[in-house]
Amino acid sequence: MKSRLRKARNAPLSSDLAESIIGAWRTNALVTARFIEAISTELWALEFPGERHRTFRTFAAHLHNSRSRWIRTLGREHGVQVPSLVDRRRVTRRSLLAALKQSARGIEDLLELGLAHGGRIPPSRAYVWRNLPLDVGNVLSYFAAHEAHHRGQIVMAARQLGHRLPPAVVNDLWQWSARARESSGRR
């Protein structure tokens, strides 16, 4: 078993695996964008329970800004275009959705960079924290988990404030087959 794993690590990545990695990221990005679209205008400016000076808007903006910072750290040195940060206190939903498209593309570019380098994003001088293994599987999992964590926080905070999100919005967070078809252009 160990020798097969060793050989597999040195083999080129199949196009099916590459498509799967990119497709999974696109699905996650679409789930996040649709969720942000669905947050009511009333919730957008409300303070998060237990979080002074943080609103639903700032949590939503954090998703884009976090992506952008990781893109800068891991990809700028390798030619990946870094999206501008948004003002987390003033960004409109429309502007944030446009920014999320840019940062989703930037993460996709990072993953493609890793896929082109045998499944690992090449090291960069800016990456000093070293909490994230740079193989594309871990990178994809890390970013998807980060966004799912914050989507869950938003759902829970809305409930705590008595502004339960509609069941269709919350249920849509789990409709990955439909979102995968949508993000790939298939129906």
Image (tube, grey):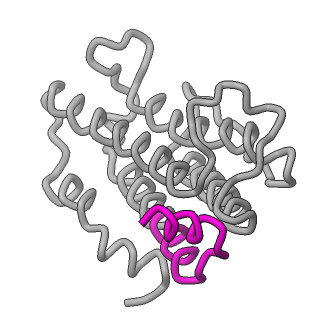
At 51% from the left and 49% from the top, the residue drawn is 138
State whether the magenta stretch is mostly helix, strand or loop: helix
Residue located farthest toward the bottom when viewing the structure as drawn: 187
User: What are the residue bounds of the magenta stretch?
Assistant: 1-24
At 27% from the left and 39% from the top, the residue drawn is 152
Q: Work out whether residue 51 or residue 120 is closer to the camera in this orientation and state it.
A: 120
Percent across and percent down for residue 56 are 38, 31
Q: In the image, is residue 39 above or below residue 33? A: above
| The C terminus: image quadrant | bottom left
Q: Please give left or right for residue 64 compared with residue 81 in the image.
A: left
| The N terminus: image quadrant | bottom left
At 20% from the left and 33% from the top, the residue drawn is 156
Percent across and percent down for residue 100 are 57, 52
Q: In the image, is residue 15 above or below residue 51? A: below
Percent across and percent down for residue 99 are 63, 50
Q: Please give left or right for residue 79 compared with residue 111 in the image.
A: right
At 48% from the left and 74% from the top, the residue drawn is 20
